[in-house]
Image (spheres, rainbow, N blue to C red):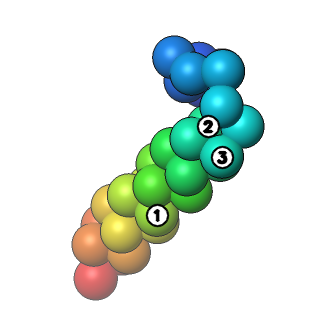
Amino acid sequence: VLAVPSDVTAHIQEMHLMLLHLWCVAVDEAVE
């Protein structure tokens, strides 16, 4: 579970997008 310390929906969505992007980068680097 990802708990973002914010009540602003846009901030929560931005954080989820950033974390997803970082996860994708990590997977991409692991595959190469």
Q: Kindly indicate whether the residue at mark 3 contacts the one at mark 2 (C-beta within 8 angstroms).
A: yes
Image position of 6 (left or right of 27): right
Amino acid of disc 3: Ala
User: Would you identify the image quadrant in which residue 22 lies?
Assistant: bottom left
Amino acid of disc 2: Ile
Q: Alpha-carbon neighbours of circle 1 within 10 Å: few (<14), some, or many (≥20)?
A: few
CA gap, disc 3 to disc 1? 16 Å
Residue at image location 72% in from the left, 37% down from the top: 9
Residue at image location 46% in from the left, 63% down from the top: 21
CA gap, disc 2 to disc 3? 5 Å
Q: Nearer the viewer, mark 2 or mark 3?
A: 3
Image position of 28 (left or right of 9): left
Q: Secondary structure at mark 1?
A: helix
Q: Which mark is residue 12?
A: 2
Comparing 29 with 14, the one in front is: 14
Counting from the top left corner in percent of width and height, residue 16 is at 58, 46
Q: Secondary structure at mark 3?
A: helix
CA gap, disc 2 to disc 1? 14 Å
Comparing 6 with 4, the one in front is: 6
Comparing 24 with 32, the one in front is: 24
Counting from the top left corner in percent of width and height, residue 27 is at 41, 64
- Work out whether 5 lies above or below 13: above
Image position of 5 (left or right of 13): left
Image position of 8 (left or right of 24): right
Q: Which residue is mark 3?
A: 10
Residue at image location 66% in from the left, 46% down from the top: 10
Which quarter shows the N terminus? top right
User: Would you identify the image quadrant in which residue 2 lies?
Assistant: top right
Q: Which residue is mark 1?
A: 21
Which quarter shows the C terminus? bottom left
Amino acid of disc 1: His
Counting from the top left corner in percent of width and height, residue 20 is at 53, 55
